[in-house]
């Protein structure tokens, strides 16, 4: 860290201490300090924060103030320092420097699978080919995980998420990595059933780990997909986290079977009542030979989620992200290292958690070399895959786009149990893409992007 960055970090640490006494009064002062420190680097975020902090009636004003009530002060300070300062301000500068220097994507976040092992067997799981009931259970060593994070930090990446398998099978190593990289923010997509008092105490000690607990709706829907009794175990984990004032979120996969529940006001209210601070929404993808295409959401159901999430953002104090439908705000597909990439438990570097093809391994290439590989460069050159950013995905929304990149790059299937031909995978998404296209185009035009829609039609 450069000298001026150390000074900035010290000032903000002192500011966070000052705010905790009276956030309602002192948060606007922090905003002023941040604006003075980062200037143009913070201008876009500054406008958003002013709208929140200057209006006590704004629902996000309520959300921000409740953070100081609901979350341990030291955890909040660490999260602010690692996520906002290191990952989103200092890290962004480094990322831009390397993008310009090497002409490749550099990720803001990296998703890692420390293990393929899992204590559940969920219906339609995209990682089913690696689950612990198979003989080919995989684990990345602590040293490998540590090396990936160190390489990422050199490029400016300070945000790391874990998936699997069930990442908390590797609790001890996850805590050890949090300690070794106290300047990074860590999170995990977890089924939550392995969160106990001892692990929560460790989370409170290291302060830089936040779980996103997978819940498929209320008890019947969750237990249908994840197994009898799972919902009650999740509620127990949530109670443990709340007792220690630890932040957590929810991860929801909406399918053709549960979309009415996932998108309901009652479910949003339930997540808020649980104490969740965010929810990350995904739609079901028919990845893997054992996939269940019937679980894919219809175009009407995807549009329903589009409208519900946007509506509740205006009225509910819950930060929400929609992995596909928020392409409008992300400028299209964020995979392939543009904003994130995925590394599975076998060490294969994949463009996305839902794209199980790779031409690079952590055991053969550095992170930077992988970002310059044919598959990742194909992503960079192809993004955005559609001028309508509500159709961002090269698999789900743009038939043939993924297959062409995989074929030209020479990438291979990374599913060791049942390798899947990319053309067969793409075929499973063809009807969904064709049905979604006119709906997405209508939503895109309605949201004020008419000129870009016109350009898309002209290209077509």
Image: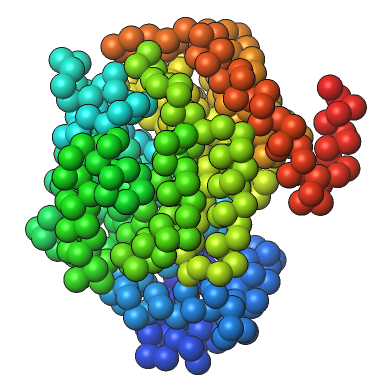
The answer to whether residue 90 shows anywhere in this view is no
The location of residue 407, given as percent across then percent down, is: 57, 8
Horizontally, is 223 left or right of 438 in the view? left
Residue at 47% from the left image edge and 74% from the top image edge: 63
Q: Nearer the viewer, residue 390 or 255?
A: 255
The location of residue 359, given as percent across then percent down, is: 46, 15
Q: Is residue 53 above or below residue 362?
A: below
Horizontally, is 340 left or right of 123 in the view? right
Horizontally, is 220 left or right of 399 in the view? left
Q: Nearer the viewer, residue 72 or 133?
A: 133
Q: Quadrant of residue 327?
A: top right
Q: Is residue 171 above or below residue 4?
A: above
Q: How many marks?
A: 0
The location of residue 260, given as percent across then percent down, is: 47, 46
Residue at 36% from the left image edge and 72% from the top image edge: 77
Position of the N terminus by quadrant = bottom left
The location of residue 266, given as percent across then percent down, is: 42, 61
Q: Nearer the viewer, residue 147 or 22?
A: 22
Which color scheme did the rendering employ for the protein? rainbow
Q: Is residue 112 above or below residue 67?
A: above
Residue at 68% from the left image edge and 64% from the top image edge: 44
Position of the C terminus by quadrant = top right
Horizontally, is 372 left or right of 219 in the view? right
The answer to whether residue 165 shows anywhere in this view is yes
Q: Is residue 31 above or below residue 249?
A: below
Residue at 56% from the left image edge and 32% from the top image edge: 298
Q: Quadrant of residue 295?
A: top left
């Amino acid at each position: 860290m450069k000298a001026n960055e150390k000074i900035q970090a010290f000032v903000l640490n002192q500011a966070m201490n000052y705010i905790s006494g009276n956030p309602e009064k002192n948060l606007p002062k922090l905003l002023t300090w941040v604006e003075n420190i980062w200037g143009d680097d913070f201008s876009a975020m500054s406008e958003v924060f002013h709208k929140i902090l200057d209006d006590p009636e704004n629902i996000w004003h309520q959300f921000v103030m409740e953070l100081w009530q609901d979350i341990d002060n030291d955890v909040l300070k660490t999260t602010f320092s690692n996520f906002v300062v290191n990952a989103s301000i200092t890290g962004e500068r480094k990322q831009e420097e390397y993008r310009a220097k090497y002409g490749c994507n550099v990720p803001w976040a990296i998703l890692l699978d420390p293990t393929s092992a899992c204590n559940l067997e969920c219906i339609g799981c995209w990682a089913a080919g690696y689950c612990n009931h198979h003989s080919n259970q995989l684990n990345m060593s602590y040293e490998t995980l540590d090396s990936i994070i160190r390489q990422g930090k050199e490029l400016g990446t300070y945000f790391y998420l874990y998936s699997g398998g069930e990442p908390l099978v590797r609790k001890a190593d996850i805590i050890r990595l949090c300690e070794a990289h106290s300047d990074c923010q860590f999170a995990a997509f977890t089924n939550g059933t392995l969160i106990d008092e001892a692990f929560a105490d460790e989370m409170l000690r290291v302060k830089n780990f936040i779980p996103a607990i997978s819940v498929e709706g209320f008890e019947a829907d969750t237990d249908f997909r994840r197994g009898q009794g799972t919902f009650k175990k999740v509620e127990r984990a949530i109670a443990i986290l709340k007792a220690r004032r630890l932040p957590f979120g929810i991860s929801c996969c909406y399918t053709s079977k549960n979309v009415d529940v996932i998108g309901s006001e009652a479910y949003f209210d339930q997540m808020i009542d649980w104490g969740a601070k965010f929810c990350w929404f995904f739609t079901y993808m028919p990845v893997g030979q054992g996939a269940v295409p019937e679980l894919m959401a219809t175009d009407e159901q995807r549009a329903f989620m589009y409208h519900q999430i946007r509506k509740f953002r205006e009225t509910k104090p819950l930060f929400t992200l929609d992995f596909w439908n928020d392409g409008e705000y992300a400028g299209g597909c964020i995979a392939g290292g543009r904003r994130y990439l995925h590394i599975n438990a076998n060490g294969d570097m994949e463009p996305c958690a839902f794209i199980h093809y790779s031409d690079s391994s952590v055991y053969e290439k550095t992170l930077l070399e992988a970002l310059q590989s044919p598959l990742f460069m194909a992503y960079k050159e192809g993004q955005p895959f559609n001028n309508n950013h509500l159709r961002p995905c090269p698999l789900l929304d743009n038939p043939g786009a993924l297959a062409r990149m995989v074929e030209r790059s020479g990438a291979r299937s990374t599913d060791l149990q049942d390798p899947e031909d990319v053309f067969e995978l793409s075929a499973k998404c063809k009807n969904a893409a064709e049905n979604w296209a006119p709906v997405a185009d209508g939503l895109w035009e309605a949201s004020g992007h008419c000129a870009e829609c016109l350009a898309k039609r002209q290209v077509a």
